[in-house]
Amino acid sequence: MTNMTLALPETLVQIMKKHKDIKWSEVAREAIWDKARKLELMDKLVSNSKLTEKDALEIGRKINEAVAKRHGL
């Protein structure tokens, strides 16, 4: 298994010190696995897509505008 070194803000370190019973390396490992699984799913979903990045950005812009309009923003 590979080791990783992280830089953490002092406020986070202080919280972690209050909860020494938590296995923080396991929390980090689970969070990284969760993100990696989501990325793998995204890769599978878009692997056969014909959309360009420009198309995706345009769709996202239209969705954001519709949501803002619906919520009166």
Image (cartoon, rainbow, N blue to C red):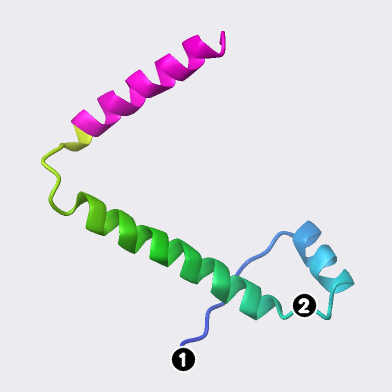
Q: Residues within 10 Å of mark 2 (few under 14, many from 20)?
A: few
Is residue 67 a member of the stretch shown in magenta?
A: yes
Q: Position of residue 11 (x, y in %)?
A: 80, 57
Q: Residues within 10 Å of mark 1 (few under 14, many from 20)?
A: few
Residue at 64 percent of width and 79 percent of height: 25
What secondary structure is the stretch in magenta mostly built from?
helix
The label number, if any, that marks residue 45 in the structure image: none
Vertical arrangement, residue 47 with respect to residue 4, above or below: above
- Amino acid type at mark 1: Met
Residue 30 in the figure: left or right of residue 39:
right
Q: What secondary structure is marked by label 2?
A: loop
Q: Read off the residue under disc 2.
A: 22
> In the current view of this chain or complex, which residue is farthest to the bottom?
1
Vertical arrangement, residue 5 with respect to residue 41, above or below: below
Span of residues in magenta: 55-73
Is residue 59 a member of the stretch shown in magenta?
A: yes
> In the current view of this chain or complex, which residue is farthest to the right?
18
Residue 54 in the figure: left or right of residue 69:
left
**Which quadrant would residue 23 be assigned to in this image?**
bottom right
**Which quadrant would residue 27 be assigned to in this image?**
bottom right
Q: Position of residue 48 (x, y in %)?
A: 12, 51
Residue at 67 percent of width and 64 percent of height: 8
Per the model, the C-alpha gap separating discs 1 and 2 is 21 Å
Q: Which of the two discs, 1 and 2, labels the residue nearer the N terminus? A: 1
Q: What secondary structure is marked by label 1?
A: loop
Residue at 26 percent of width and 57 percent of height: 43
Q: Quadrant of the C terminus?
A: top right
Q: Position of residue 21 (x, y in %)?
A: 83, 81
Contact check, label 1 and label 2, Cβ < 8 Å: no
Q: Read off the residue under disc 1.
A: 1
Residue at 21 percent of width and 37 percent of height: 53
- Amino acid type at mark 2: Ile
